Image (tube, rainbow, N blue to C red):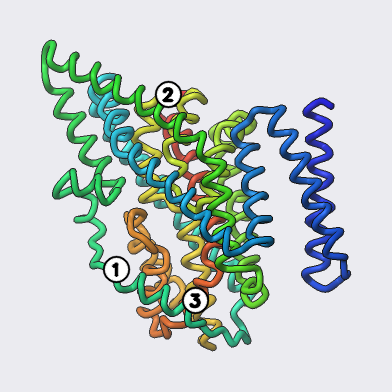
Amino acid sequence: MDKRKLLLILLLLFFIDSTFHLLNWFEVLEVNAILLQIIRWVFILVLGVYAWKSKSLTVYILLCMFLGIEVAGIAPNWAKELKVLSDIFLRLIKTIIAPLLFSTLVVGIAGHSDLKQVGRMGLKSIIYFEVVTTIALFIGLAAINITKAGKGSSLNAQTEQVDKANKLLEQNHSHNVILDIFPENIAKSVAENQVLQIVVFSILFGIALSQVKGGVKEKMVQSIEGLAEVMFKFTNLVMYTAPLAVGGAIGYAIATMGYGVLHDLIKLLMTLYVALIIFILVVLVPIGLIVKLPFKKFLQHISEPLSIAFATASSEAALPKAMENLEKMGIPRKVVAFVLPTGFSFNLDGTTLYLSLASVFIAQVSGVDLTLGQQVYMCLILMLTSKGVAGVRGASFLILVSTVSSLGLDPQKAFAILAIDAFMDMGRTSVNLMGNCLATYVIAKWEREV
């Protein structure tokens, strides 16, 4: 059987499986549990055959994702132990990020680019990021005001969510948006995986190297260019472990959180995902049309890092592969190395949308009707506080707590949201990645590099 027929069978099985599960979950139709399990395993078996025939890493990632879900349902305690697979993958990825960013940025600036172009790209990127994230904030506001997902809800945090929230709040630290851009110790920035600080150091190093004359500069550029090539090969090796990492991450998330929590917060979760889809359709797609983005080619190149970002809920995990694939797509390395990592600090479209939506949701749960002026004021706060904190663990939750506190709301109401935070993080991280990959193409187009 050829791959096209297998793909059609896969889509049909997925549609049948999803429909039956939704009908059963919402108690519209009672479907036999054994029948549901048989359909799921037939789907996984066909997906396995398709993965073997296609030899595609993306398909293997999807296969392991569904296997992780099944393991979480059959043996949840064992599934929790699979988290070690995703932790190993994330550790390996973190070892790649600093040398990869350093080498690609330095070579891009000192070897191929002029300093005026770096300045232009920086200015254009910041303007683009600010406009798009502001639109995302207001789409989140509109979505939660339409669905009113928190109205009439008696949402209370369980002990598990309170403990998790307290741990996140304990590691909170004062955040100065401007000061935190600049590294005080590059070794410390690398150790803490402060992507933006690594970017700033690499840019300054590249500018300094571009001013060096003679053979010293050429030798340095060649050596650093060799480092970049090695790190891309390193990335390819690490990616072989991605399917197992994805299976472990999704299995752990479901085994830990379970599907039960979705019943209480399903309206919030659905509001977020619908808002994210609307953002893609009314913002990202039109931008792609304006810059004449080759959509098919673009989706083919981001599908693999996108599946990694979704399953692991980590932009860092997808960054090295996204950089490599965008370069393969035809975007120059100097643009990819500058725009993509910078975007992960300043262009968090999915996260900013979530923050405005979740803040109003908490107000609704608290029985407080925020005026239009208060909501706009909240967006102004979020426009500032959501920038440059991508490297902080639990950053989204910390920003959410500080925002609702500034509005005079009880921050403990935010604790309950942590019950489904893993599921929401998958969606917002995927949109963050998609938005940043598009931003990279947009800046390259403006610079007439593609």
Q: Which mark is residue 171?
A: 1
Numbered disc 1: secondary structure: loop
Badge 3, how many Cα within 10 Å: few under 14, some, many 20+? few
2 or 3: tag closer to the N-terminus: 3
1 or 2: tag closer to the N-terminus: 1
Q: Nearer the viewer, residue 261 or 443?
A: 261
Numbered disc 2: secondary structure: loop
Quarter holding residue 153: bottom right
Tell me what residue is drawn at x 47 percent, y 42 percent: 318
Compared with 254, 2 (above or below) is above
The amino acid type, in three-letter code, at marker 2 is Glu
Which residue is disc 2 drawn over? Answer: 449
Which residue is disc 3 drawn over? Answer: 372
Are the two marked residues, 1 and 2, in contact with CB atoms closer than 8 angstroms? no
In percent of width and height, residue 110 lies at 23, 23
How many angstroms separate mark 1 from mark 2 (CA)?
42 Å
Quarter holding residue 97: top left
